[in-house]
Amino acid sequence: MNTGILMLWGVWDTIYQRCTRLRYIDKGNNIFRIVLLRYRGEPLVTTDQRVICHGDLILKLHIHNYYFATQCKGVKDDLRVALLLRHHIMRSLPQLAAYLDGHEERDRIKGVVGTTMLHKGVKPLGFSISDVPMTWFFRYKRWYLRLMVRLIHPDGKRRIERWDREMPLKRVYMSKEELLRRYLPRQPEPAGDRQ
């Protein structure tokens, strides 16, 4: 990525952060930013058969695109970008689980929900995937994410058409229980409790 574009994006990202309710889980070490809000959409059935309904409290997931772009600077290979993204997600999920587990609204939060074009390979991580309605908001979101792909991807401009066909905008989500079961670090049992 052009260094000048990256610097401008960093300025914009700082302004955007200050103007939104997005919160860092661990700034500079976690690829997710989150916001606590009420879910607005159709019911979502998770992999463990729990249901996130309209009005339920959720953590809305946002991939920190600027942070990821800085990590990809100088990477030219498609596969390496994909592997780098997976590495950051895998490293970030336990921190996300710990954040949710310690949240003051923990008992009321039903799960985590995000919207992304980068949904290939998320099912083995515990996420479910569904289509999003193409409302004006999701059309804008799709345009914005396409811009991010164009900026981040080493061959962005020529890849947009293929990504549009193969990676449409999707909703990805996971129940709180599944997130904690998979990613919350387990505390060792006291020695006296072991059989």
Image (spheres, rainbow, N blue to C red):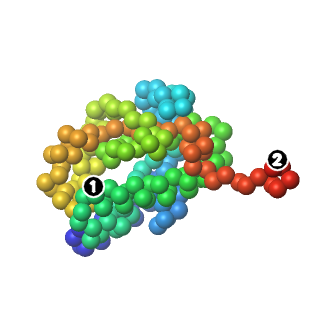
The kind of residue tagged 2 is Gln
Q: Secondary structure at mark 2?
A: loop
Q: Residues within 10 Å of mark 2 (few under 14, many from 20)?
A: few
In the depicted view, which residue is nearer to us: 63 or 37? 63
| The furthest residue to the left | 158
Q: Quadrant of residue 138?
A: top left
Q: x, y percentage for residue 79?
A: 28, 58
Instruction: Please give left or right for residue 191 compared with residue 13 in the image.
Output: right
Whether residues under marks 1 and 2 lie with C-beta atoms below 8 angstroms apart, the answer is no
Against 42, residue 31 (above or below) is below
The kind of residue tagged 1 is Met
Q: Residue at x 56, y 54 (%)?
A: 94
Residue 120 in sight here: yes
Identify residue for label 2: 195
Query: Which disc number belongs to residue 18?
Result: none
Against 190, residue 178 (above or below) is above
Q: Residue at x 33, y 47 (%)?
A: 118
Q: Secondary structure at mark 1?
A: helix
Q: Residues within 10 Å of mark 1 (few under 14, many from 20)?
A: some
- The mark lying in front, picked from 1 and 2, is 2
Identify residue for label 1: 148
| The furthest residue to the bottom | 3
Against 82, residue 6 (above or below) is below
Q: Quadrant of residue 134?
A: top left
Q: Quadrant of residue 10?
A: bottom left
Instruction: Please give left or right for residue 161 compared with residue 90 in the image.
Output: left
- Work out how far the residue at label 1 is from the one at label 2, CA to CA, in angstroms: 53 Å
Q: x, y percentage for residue 24?
A: 50, 58
Q: x, y percentage for residue 181?
A: 60, 43
Q: x, y percentage for residue 182?
A: 57, 45
